[in-house]
Image (tube, helix red, strand yellow):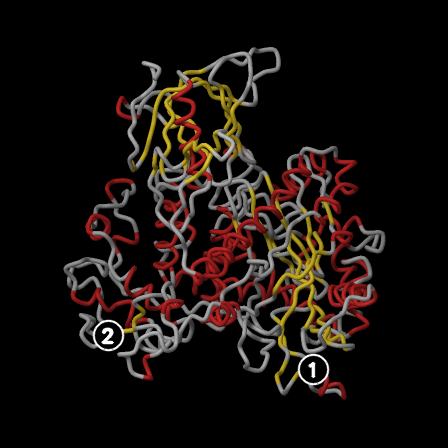
Amino acid sequence: SDPGSPTVKSQQISKYGGTLLYKRRSRSAFYKQKRWKRRYFEIEERMLYCYNVTPKRGGKLRRAMPLEGATVEVFEGKYPFMFVVKNHHFEYTIRAKSENDMKLWIRLLRGESEANALIPHMLSTDEIFQEKNGNGEEETKRSPPNKLTPSQEARFEFFRNERDFVAAVCDVAEVLRFREPSDRKKVAPGLVAGIKLPPCGYVPLCKSTDIWRRVDSVMASETRVFNTNERCPMIYYFIAKRGEPVGSTLEPRNHNLDVAEYLHTLFKVPDLDNRRLTSIGEHADELQLGESEDSGDKDKGEVKVEDQANEDYDEFELTMEDPTEHRNSVWSESSNTSKSFLSTSMKGMKGNQQFREFMQESLAKLPSKIATRMSRTDGRPQGKKGRKSYLDRNSAPLLNVPIIDTPIVESSHDDDSAADSSLDGQSIISAGTGSIVFGDTIKTFEHHDGINKESLDRAKAVVCGGESWAEQSARMLQSVKKEGEEQDESTLHEIVTMMAKSNDDLRQEVFVMQMIHYFESVFAKANIPVWLKTYRILSTSKSTGMLEFLTDATSIDSLYKSDKFPKVGGLRAYFEQVYGSSTSKCFLAAQRNFIRSLAGYSLVAYLLGLKDRHNGNIMIDTRGHIIHIDFGFAFGMAPGHEWSFERAPFKLTKDYIDVMGGPSSEGFKEFQKLFVDGLKAARSNSLNALGLVEIMMYKSNYPCFSGPRYGGGVSLKRFEKRLLLDVPDDKVETKARKLIKKSIDHKGTKLYDVFQFYSNGYAY
């Protein structure tokens, strides 16, 4: 063998590394020549890491490439011993020292690219070997990998197909980003039609308790594309099915089956009741009926479980004692109550028993290092003159805030079609507005809040082009029926829509939406009737993600630009044009929706420091609610930073006040009362909110928590200040009213709207 090649015997190793020459696919500039660079490469856990020098000498990681599904090929080029490693996002052209060294790297890389994600894979130098066939020619063969049981393989295939489906949906938006804006809408339907749909997949913008909707097909021709300077967001429309038979079960079809129940039934996960699972079905295939002659009849074909009677889990009743009295962290290993803290708090809760058991066993205790760090009173940064943060100074117990759920919309039974809105005695429910079809019947779901159909028809003509989401989804379902596809009359068909984005990091937006959901729950617990729209956001990578598409709504920018928007009078004239005179029932209902939503978003915009509030990031729906979107600037982070125009606590324009009836109207007084009460409620539940923010900011790379302007606890201190924790209780209302007064028609708000109009064309 070549003296320069490494001597590695056939053995299993945890990782393998060495120095290689490589070139990247892209250049730093077109006029510069791509040079070979000497880098240290390392293969470990199905990843290819690239360091400037070996980590033992303090080398820094430059790049990391996932090897799953990557292709590794020999490259015949100008130089010897070259090979290429590439996947969808990376491509490395690499030179080895010798032919043997090249073959070894190729073997290892190919072995890692084909490894099974469920089974820990150890690198083996003889995984891929050469063997002569019957004709005397060498043939490449691979050692058989570790095999999965049938139940493992079924679940693995489900999750892999779901992951590939989500990646493909987001990749189309990334591909379109590099096409000419004029060609995007023409190319998009073809790319969408080429997406491979999984046999059992769903749009993952839901909870485990939401209704299961299997994606059956995609309506490529209905795809919508938005052209922006840096991104190409897309709207997808999928046809989903509900109420299909699950596996080989003989039970009646349930059209309201949730995601967790469907998957448990599909993969035959046993019901644990109050027992602990020792094997989650991995060896279920080995337990066949009649397999064991010694076992009793009742034990045949069942997964073995064991009682928890002998486990060291002492249950106790929750009391109102101060948890900080004993000077021990709740998570501390030395705390006797920590073992059953989660199990007790989850006692009696509905939901997935396996998930509760997992939480109890896996999250009942934190590692000792983290528990010690959390128990120190001096662990957090202190303010000026050594002043401790509010979390350190406060020893009161955390208040329990139940997180509210999405309201369920159920088909009405007040008309003659009541019999048509159920199947086999089951009521058909939906988590939102829209239409479903079963057999020859189309059922529409809509909220009822005092606004009549005539007003909604006038609103949809301005807001959504004359067609509401219920009507649009019904039209799409009708078009599918006309195509002649045979449909099972006992299966429901429904349109599921979503937005896919690329070149955008949605992780910060996910956290901001979680905080909005938390404050929504705080306000609901305090019986404060503000309105907030918490929509689903899923970050699939650092540059791609999926969002729930807001139906029957448009941006205020688009509303102002509509041909049917009043030429004079602003939003007030629009409300009177759509909902009737200022004394009509519909107008008052829409005005109430506007006031409650404005109060809710004014509260969260102030508390969370939401900026970039131009009219392209504020929407309005057909019922008068306003909805804030796009939370790329939060916790005081603003465009322009120190030079930002947005100095007001929140956006409160003259247009908004006119809709409420003016600064001396009853509507404006109602807005003030909601804002004051909401701020008091947020202040009373500040410990939970501060804890959530502090946890998320620890070593965070979110823009709002990092850098010299917002890092080092700066955002947390500003958030604490906005909660008015140092203001006496009897002066909170006065302070809140001053915030409202400061925000009314603020000059900075006007200037920012003018700036956005001339820079990006957003109307104001």
- Residue 6, picture quadrant: top left
Measured Cα–Cα span from mark 2 to mark 1: 45 Å
Q: How many marks?
A: 2
Q: Residue at x 37, y 40 (%)?
A: 45
Nearest the camera: 141 or 283? 141
Side of 675 relative to 186 (left or right) = left
- Going by the numbered disc 2, the residue's amino acid type is Gln
Q: Residues within 10 Å of mark 2 (few under 14, many from 20)?
A: few
Give the numbered dot on residue 481: none
**Residue 729 picture location, percent across and down:** 37, 63
- Going by the numbered disc 1, the residue's amino acid type is Ser
Residue indicated by mark 1:
421
Please tell me whether residue 605 is drawn above or below residue 399 in the rendered image.
above
Side of 493 relative to 640 (left or right) = right
**Residue 722 picture location, percent across and down:** 43, 51
Side of 218 relative to 395 (left or right) = right
Q: Residue at x 72, y 48 (%)?
A: 557
Nearest the camera: 147 or 382? 147
Residue indicated by mark 2:
308
In the picture, which quadrant includes the N terminus? top left
- Residue 122, picture quadrant: top left
Label 2 or label 1, whichever lies nearer to me, is 2
Q: Residue at x 51, y 36 (%)?
A: 70
Please tell me whether residue 59 is drawn above or below residue 302 in the rendered image.
above
Q: Secondary structure at mark 2?
A: loop
Q: Residue at x 64, y 79 (%)?
A: 428
**Residue 422 picture location, percent across and down:** 67, 83
Nearest the camera: 109 or 560? 109
**Residue 314 picture location, percent across and down:** 19, 73
Please tell me whether residue 583 is drawn above or below residue 534 in the rendered image.
below
